[in-house]
């Protein structure tokens, strides 16, 4: 069967229309082969929202805006039809929030799926919510600030237009007079200022000279200190070491039995002999004090002796001997030891 050219042209036109329809739907964002449901939302204003704008759920696009219609019977509100995936659990508590999708102001609808008691199957109205954009926030914050700035500028202008101008002019005049007075005072005291400057220069020169002297003195002290460190301290250390060595030698000799001091410190027999000698000497002295005539005799032409000589050779009176006998009677009653004898002096030659 032969197909005529007219039928071919008609089939080609139908195919073009079908392709054009599906292309238009695809460009609008419609899903051609996947299943979807359509819902609508009513807003009071949809500035920036257009057909095919995306519908998001948790940041993922799940649909698009299918159509928009102005409802003249409902105070010119706008009905927005959205097409979303059929597998979403949309219900009576689902919120369709209109807000910005980027910083440039593009609009998008974001779904918030809450725990719904009733599940929708398509064609139902969702809860509308409109987010506040950054531009709206800036406008709401900036308008009061601008009003306050305008009010402040108006008040400043009023102040400047009335008495403030005269006050400012008087302040400027006073400033000029003050400047002239300061200049006059400076001109009058120019000589004193020059003298003060010269004195400061002389003082600076003297301080510099003093600084050089101090530096020279410091250098000399450093040299003296270095010399003392190299000579005197070393000699002092050597002398101290030799003194310590001699002291150690002396102590070792004292601890040993060598030398008089060492024997005196370590020989116990010598110590006992010295104690016995001291006791014998004490007995001898007491006996001399008690019986001086046994050891020393004085004869002066029939005169009775009234003096005696003690152990140290000092001549004492008999009254002092009697006082000693009265104070220590027991000591004077002791017999004198026979081993201690002193030959009396020969008085015939003196006569």
Image: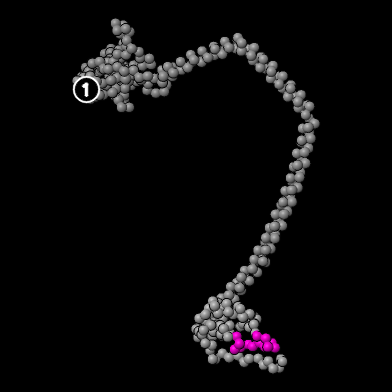
Can residue 5 be seen here? The reply is: no
Q: Quadrant of the C terminus?
A: bottom right
Residue 13: image quadrant is top left
Percent position (x, y) of residue 36? 24, 21
Name the residue furthest right.
Answer: 191
Is residue 299 magenta-colored? yes
Q: Which residues are magenta?
A: 292-304
Could you tell me which residue is drawn at 36 percent across and 16 percent down?
49
Can residue 233 be seen here? The reply is: yes
Relative placement, left or right, of 69 versus 156 is left
Name the residue furthest top.
Answer: 73
Name the residue furthest front.
Answer: 302
Is residue 186 magenta-colored? no
The kind of secondary structure element at disc 1 is: loop
Residue density around tag 1, few if under 14, some if 14–19, many if 20 or more, within 10 Å: few
What is the tally of numbered marks visible in this picture? 1
Relative placement, left or right, of 1 versus 231 is left
Residue 126: image quadrant is top left
Relative placement, left or right, of 30 versus 204 is left
């Amino acid at each position: 069967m032969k197909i005529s050219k007219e039928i071919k042209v008609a089939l080609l036109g139908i195919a073009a229309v079908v392709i054009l329809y599906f292309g238009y739907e695809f460009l609008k964002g419609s899903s051609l082969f996947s299943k979807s449901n359509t819902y609508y939302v009513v807003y009071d204003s949809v500035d920036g929202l257009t057909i095919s704008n995306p519908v998001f759920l948790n940041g993922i696009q799940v649909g698009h805006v299918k159509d928009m219609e102005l409802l003249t019977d409902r105070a010119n509100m706008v009905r927005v039809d959205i097409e979303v995936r059929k597998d979403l659990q949309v219900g009576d508590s689902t919120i369709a929030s209109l807000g910005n999708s980027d910083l440039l102001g593009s609009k998008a609808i974001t779904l918030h799926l809450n725990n719904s008691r009733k599940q929708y199957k398509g064609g139902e109205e969702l809860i509308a919510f409109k987010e506040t954009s950054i531009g709206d926030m800036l406008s709401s914050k900036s308008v009061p600030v601008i009003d306050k700035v305008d009010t402040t500028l108006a008040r400043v202008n009023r102040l400047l237009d009335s008495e403030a101008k005269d006050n400012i002019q008087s302040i400027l005049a006073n400033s000029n007079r003050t400047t002239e007075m300061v200049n006059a005072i400076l001109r009058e005291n120019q000589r004193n200022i020059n003298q003060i400057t010269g004195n400061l220069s002389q003082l600076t020169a003297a301080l510099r000279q003093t600084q050089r002297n101090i530096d020279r003195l410091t250098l000399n002290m450093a040299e003296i200190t270095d010399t003392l460190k190299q000579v005197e301290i070393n000699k002092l250390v050597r002398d101290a070491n030799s003194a310590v060595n001699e002291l150690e030698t002396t102590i070792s000799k004292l601890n040993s039995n060598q030398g008089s001091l060492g024997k005196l410190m370590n020989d116990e027999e010598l110590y006992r002999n010295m104690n016995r000698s001291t006791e014998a000497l004490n007995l001898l002295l007491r006996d001399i004090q008690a019986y001086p005539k046994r050891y020393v005799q004085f004869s002066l032409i029939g005169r009775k002796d009234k003096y005696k000589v003690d152990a140290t050779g000092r001549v004492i009176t008999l009254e002092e001997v009697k006082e000693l006998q009265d104070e220590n009677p027991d000591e004077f009653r002791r017999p004198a030891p026979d081993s201690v004898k002193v030959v009396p002096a020969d008085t015939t030659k003196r006569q």
